[in-house]
Image: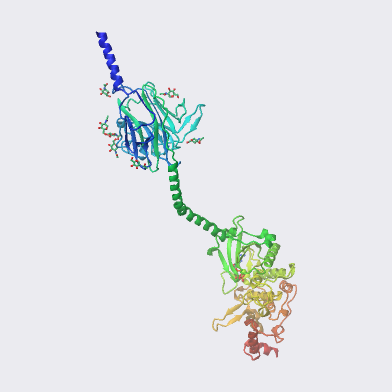
Amino acid sequence: MYLKLFFFIILSQCLHYSSSQILDFTYNGFPHPLPDISVQGFATVTRNGLLMLTNMTVQKTGHAFYNKPIRFKDSPNGSVSSFSTTFVFAIHSPFPILSGHGMAFVVAPNTSLPFATSGQYLGLFNFTNNGNETNHVFAVELDTISNFEFNDPNNNHVGIDINSLESVKSLPAGWWDEKGQFKNLTLMSRKPMQVWVDYDGLTHQINVSLAPFRKSKPTKPLVSIVKDLSSVLLQDMFVGFSSATGSFLSEHFVLGWSFGVNRKAPPLSKLPKLPKFKERDIFYKNWMLSISIFVVPLVFIPSLIFLVRFILLRRRKFAEELEDWETDFKKNRLKFKELYYATKGFKEKGLLGSGGFGSVYKGVLPKTQQEIAVKRVSNESKQGLKEFVSEIVSIGRMSHRNLVPLLGYCRRRDELILVYDYMPNGSLDQYLYNTPELTLGWKQRIKVINGVASALFFLHEEWEQVVIHRDIKASNVLLDAEYNGRLGDFGLARLCGHGSDPQTTRVAGTWGYLAPEYVRTGHATTATDVFAVGVLLLEVACGRRPIEIQNESGERVFIVDWVFRFWIEGNILDAKDPNLGTEYDQREVEMVLKLGLMCSHSEPYIRPSMRQVIHYLSGDAMLPDLTPLDLYGRGMMLGIHHGFSELDMFTVASRMFTGGSSIVDSILSGGR
Ligand SMILES: Nc1ncnc2c1ncn2[C@@H]1O[C@H](COP(=O)(O)OP(=O)(O)OP(=O)(O)O)[C@@H](O)[C@H]1O
Ligand SMILES: *[C@@H]1O[C@H](CO)[C@@H](O)[C@H](O)[C@H]1NC(C)=O
Ligand SMILES: *[C@@H]1O[C@H](CO)[C@@H](O)[C@H](O)[C@H]1NC(C)=O
Ligand SMILES: *[C@@H]1O[C@H](CO)[C@@H](O)[C@H](O)[C@H]1NC(C)=O
Ligand SMILES: *[C@@H]1O[C@H](CO)[C@@H](O)[C@H](O)[C@H]1NC(C)=O
Ligand SMILES: *[C@@H]1O[C@H](CO)[C@@H](O)[C@H](O)[C@H]1NC(C)=O
Ligand SMILES: *[C@@H]1O[C@H](CO)[C@@H](O)[C@H](O)[C@H]1NC(C)=O
Ligand SMILES: *[C@@H]1O[C@H](CO)[C@@H](O)[C@H](O)[C@H]1NC(C)=O
Ligand SMILES: [Mg+2]
């Protein structure tokens, strides 16, 4: 009887057990109508038997739960039994590199998670309940987005989640193959993959394995932790899947699924095929194509235009001209870019001055820190350029101590750039006129004059060919650190006067320094240079501009006439610069004044050569003891310096003989 009762109890318990407890189930595909599975949200079952948790809709969730409760514990306070599950999934997105958010195997207290949100919450939790122990949710996530707030390792990971999306442990997706080597897997690769989740009720070990579909279960799991789930799982729980999309269009599929409590999940076989994504691919390719048709022009073309413009502008900005004949001067070529940076972009700040041919900028060569003066000469025609360049380069190579050293040149369209040593003390004109801040003593002036004379003598006679400077004047006499006079701008005037055709050649030079015969014929000679030297000598001795405008009458007074008047009046020394002070040699000043007059005589043949000038200046030869009449007594026209045309000379001449000017008067009277 007792035995009978005992058997009955055992039997009834067994029967009860077997009738009410789910021990395992298997879905090799998901047939229509779907037995024992409830789907919610955007989850559906496709016609060919795939469980599609989410379709191509953004920010949605999908759930599918086995709708019979699973008894995980023998008693409410008992420990969780061993369980095991395996499933095959695939994730598809139109863009093979963008998918989201992911999917998860879930053990939850109910067949729905109504408050769970999409996106990074994977349809498991929401912002407020994430991490709350009252959730009683265990999940294995297959996550294709990296959320730093959940400490995700990357955008392709597998994690074990307990009540929270911050995984207890997560690792990049991959598997340990038969040879024990780790291989990466890409969850969103569209390829089917199998997952195994095993929990050992005694050791509390949770293993999660992943492998490509049709591979056997890896012997080494991907993620493994030891965690007692007794406090997490309730006695009866529901198992299923959750998935969510974010901003990327994605489909999450389950192809097959089996589950077992206290036993291994049954193996899966004959699973339905994934749909061919081709049709959609074409659609999305077209979509991408149409996107690119709009986006590429919108984004790339303006930036391309910008880039091309930038490059072109830069190229134009730094463009240079280089011709075959320049190969000989390669060493003297300088890069415009370098000069541009040396002068900080030819800024107004670095402008030293502007003359008849261009502007001069101060600069510092970046490589050597050498100070330079950069002269930009606009030059529209190329006539004579070759000769000019070869001349200045070869003279520059000579490095005469009284010539401003030419460091090199650069040629651009319509422009020639000459690079000289920077002369720290500027040009002579800054020390002479009116009452300058700084003036030079007589010794210094003589030194400067000697320097200029020696440089010009070099150009006229010592150099292999006769070089005519054509633009001797105070602003082209530069002072180096020791106040040596150095002649600059040699040859430039010829370049700008253009070539050899006397019909078209312009007169280039500076008023006040132009010899009358040069103005008449346009033919420059060494004597025309000497004329300018004469004016320069007078300037240095008198501290006066070559042409000064008289305050009262507005009349222009030429320095030669002005000095000549003092000479005629017998007190030539009164013409000297009042700023000279007292420390000067009277005889020397007188000599310089007379030599100046002699050099700037209107008749070229009366002017001395530079060789003679040097002799006179050095005292090696005595200046002939001239009187005004010796110089101008042969009926030479005076006042020629005022005018430069034949007509002007005619009027001057006639005025001379009608006794219009007091100087002429005195000459005439003196001559008689
Ligand atoms: N190598 C140099 N070092 C220092 N300053 C210089 C140098 N070359 C020129 N300068 C300064 O730049 C100014 C302008 O020179 P620029 O040669 O352009 O004009 P200019 O000499 O007055 O006339 P021109 O064009 O007839 O030579 C000069 O007055 C001089 O003060
Ligand atoms: C996704 O599923 C929802 C609901 O099932 C449906 O309304 C929608 O049309 C589907 N979208 C696509 C792209 O299949
Ligand atoms: C289960 O544990 C709770 C406290 O954790 C206790 O109140 C309850 O009585 C226990 N139930 C059983 C059946 O042991
Ligand atoms: C599951 O949720 C539904 C409502 O969503 C509720 O009626 C039901 O009681 C819940 N079941 C359990 C086991 O919590
Ligand atoms: C989150 O879910 C809980 C239930 O788990 C619900 O009470 C709460 O209102 C939800 N919060 C939001 C913001 O949806
Ligand atoms: C967890 O959720 C419960 C019920 O929803 C709530 O009472 C409790 O305050 C939450 N705990 C935390 C830490 O948010
Ligand atoms: C595997 O993935 C990891 C991180 O995701 C990466 O560093 C590694 O280079 C990958 N290995 C191969 C063979 O692709
Ligand atoms: C987890 O994997 C290890 C081998 O890495 C194995 O020894 C252990 O039995 C596994 N546990 C479960 C619950 O499968
Ligand atoms: Mg100059």
Count of picture labels: 0
Q: Nearer the viewer, residue 434 or 452?
A: 452
Residue 313 x, y percent position in the rendering: 54, 59
Q: Quadrant of residue 464?
A: bottom right
Instruction: Please name the residue shown 54% across and 81% down the image.
Output: 551
* Observer able to see residue 440: no
Q: Viewer-proximal residue, 643 or 607?
A: 643
Closer to the camera in the image, 266 or 385: 266
Residue 606 appears left or right of 660: right
Answer with left or right where residue 359 lies relative to residue 601. Answer: left
Left or right of 18 on screen, residue 503: right
Q: State whether residue 466 appears in this view.
A: yes
Q: Quadrant of the C terminus?
A: bottom right
- State the scheme by which the image is colored: rainbow
For this orientation, the residue located farthest to the left is: 1
Quadrant in which ligand 8 is drawn: top left
Q: Position of residue 570 (x, y in %)?
A: 66, 83
Q: Nearer the viewer, residue 334 or 47?
A: 47
Q: Position of residue 156 (x, y in %)?
A: 44, 36
Residue shown at the point (64%, 91%) measured from the top left: 658
On screen, 316 above or below 189?
Answer: below
Asked where in the image residue 188 lies, by quadrant, the reply is: top left
The N terminus lies in quadrant: top left
Q: Is residue 370 left or right of residue 95?
A: right
Location of residue 74 (image quadrant): top left
In the rendered image, residue 444, in percent from the top left (x then y), is placed at 65, 69
Residue 151 sits above or below residue 292 on the image: above
